[in-house]
Image (tube, helix red, strand yellow):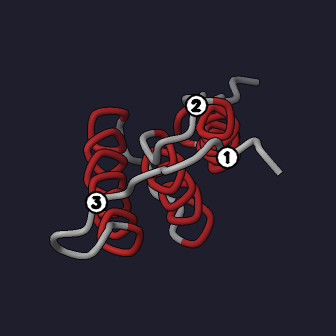
Amino acid sequence: MNDIVQIIPIWAFWWVWMAAALLLAIIEIMLPGFLFLGFAIGAALVGIMLVFAPMALGLPLLLVIFAVLSLVAWAVLRRIFRLKDGQVRRVHGDVNKG
């Protein structure tokens, strides 16, 4: 019998994108600054997209979707956590002194 075996590339699985999101979130904890958090949110959104709408998309298209979602997530995070106009964060004392 000749059975056709379909090989699915690794980037088409939702759990790969969720694992990447978790890894990026861990990196964000180690190196804070909201840089990797936008990428983690973008990877998680791509993973969720693949869970609810499984599609046979190629790697270039998935990377474009990831980049756009990461950029949107970063812009939203920046808008939420930014300082108000004209404000400057100043530390007047040692934060470790009790």
The residue under the point 51% across, 56% down is 41
Judged from the image, the secondary structure of the residue bearing numbered disc 3 is: loop
Q: Is residue 88 above or below residue 52?
A: above
Q: Nearer the viewer, mark 2 or mark 1?
A: 1
Q: Position of residue 64 (x, y in %)?
A: 25, 44
Crowd around label 1: few <14 · some 14–19 · many ≥20 (10 Å) = few
Q: Which residue is mark 3?
A: 88
Q: Amino acid type of disc 1? A: Val
The residue under the point 33% across, 39% down is 63
Q: Which residue is mark 1?
A: 95
Closest to the observer: 17 or 52? 17
The residue under the point 60% across, 28% down is 7
Closest to the observer: 72 or 53? 72
Which quarter shows the N terminus? Answer: top right
Q: Position of residue 95 (x, y in %)?
A: 67, 46
Closest to the observer: 26 or 65? 26
Q: CA distance from mark 3 to mark 1?
A: 17 Å
Judged from the image, the secondary structure of the residue bearing numbered disc 2 is: loop
Q: Is residue 8 above or below residue 95?
A: above
Earlier along the polypeptide chain: callout 3 or callout 1? Answer: 3
Q: Amino acid type of disc 2? A: Leu
The residue under the point 57% across, 55% down is 44
Q: Which residue is mark 2?
A: 31
Q: Position of residue 19 (x, y in %)?
A: 70, 39
Q: Position of residue 88 (x, y in %)?
A: 28, 60
